[in-house]
Image (tube, grey):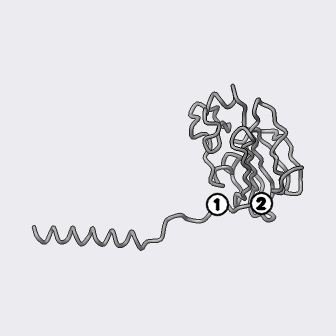
Amino acid sequence: MKIRTATLGALAALAIAASGCAASPTGPSTWKAGVCDGTEGVTVVVDWSENLGDQQLVRCALGTPASGIAALQAIGLVVNANAPDAVPGSVCTIQNLPVGGYPACWLTEGYWSYWRAPSTSGSWDFAPSGPSEGPLVAGTVEGFAWAPDFLSDGPRTGPDGNPLP
């Protein structure tokens, strides 16, 4: 019994020591702050508008995400977590906003409008397909702007990452 107890104690101590010294398993980064350089990835612009906290975010999703939704996830944002009844393939909430989830998005408060630009020197065009479509092309720009009352002129940040006039 003493040997078994000592062995278990030694194994527990070894496991604790190893966990404290081991490198964290974060893996390679899937994004960087700001716009992408050339074709290193897809630039993603998110505009929460005045109604959802008045924040804007620009990040580069490294590589070529499979879709606009995959690009949002690649830059570390949570999509539809509080909207389990959202239409499949749609963006109802980003970072749990709007708080009401579905049906606040799409039916009563507004929706996430989806925009695209061919490059960071281009201009916004309303996306001709939904955010679940792809694949995306490196060097392009994806934009998401909350459209309160279902009206949107696109993100207030340009495809180049700078505020629009």
Q: Position of residue 22 (x, y in %)?
A: 43, 71
Q: CA distance from mark 1 to mark 2?
A: 13 Å
- Label number found at residue 157: none
Q: Earlier in the sequence, mark 1 or mark 2?
A: 1
Q: As rendered, which of 19 and 157 lies closer to the eye?
A: 157
Residue 29 located left or right of residue 155: left
What percent of the width, then of the height, locates residue 116?
Answer: 81, 47
Residue plotted at (63% across, 50% down): 77
Quarter placement of the N terminus: bottom left
Please determine whether, in this image, residue 60 is positioned above or below residue 103: below
Residue 7: give x, y in percent of width and height: 20, 71
Q: Which residue is mark 2?
A: 35
Which of the 4 quarters of the picture holds residue 28?
Answer: bottom right
Residue 10 location (% of width, % of height): 24, 72
Counting every numbered tag in the picture gives 2
Mark 1, residue position: 30
Where is residue 2, by image quadrant?
bottom left
Mark 1, Cα crowd under 10 Å, few <14 / some 14-19 / many 20+, is: some
Residue name at image x 76 percent, y 56 percent:
43
Contact? badges 1 and 2 (CB < 8 Å):
no
Residue at 65% from the left image edge and 43% from the top image edge: 94
Using the rendered view, name the quadrant where residue 155 is placed: top right
Q: In the displayed image of the protein, which residue is found farthest to the left?
A: 1
- Say what secondary structure mark 2 lies in: loop
Residue at 82 percent of width and 39 percent of height: 128
Mark 1 or 2: the one toward you: 2
Kind of residue at badge 1: Thr
Amino acid of disc 2:
Val
For the residue carrying disc 2, how many other residues have a C-alpha within 10 Å: few (<14), some (14-19), or many (20+)? many
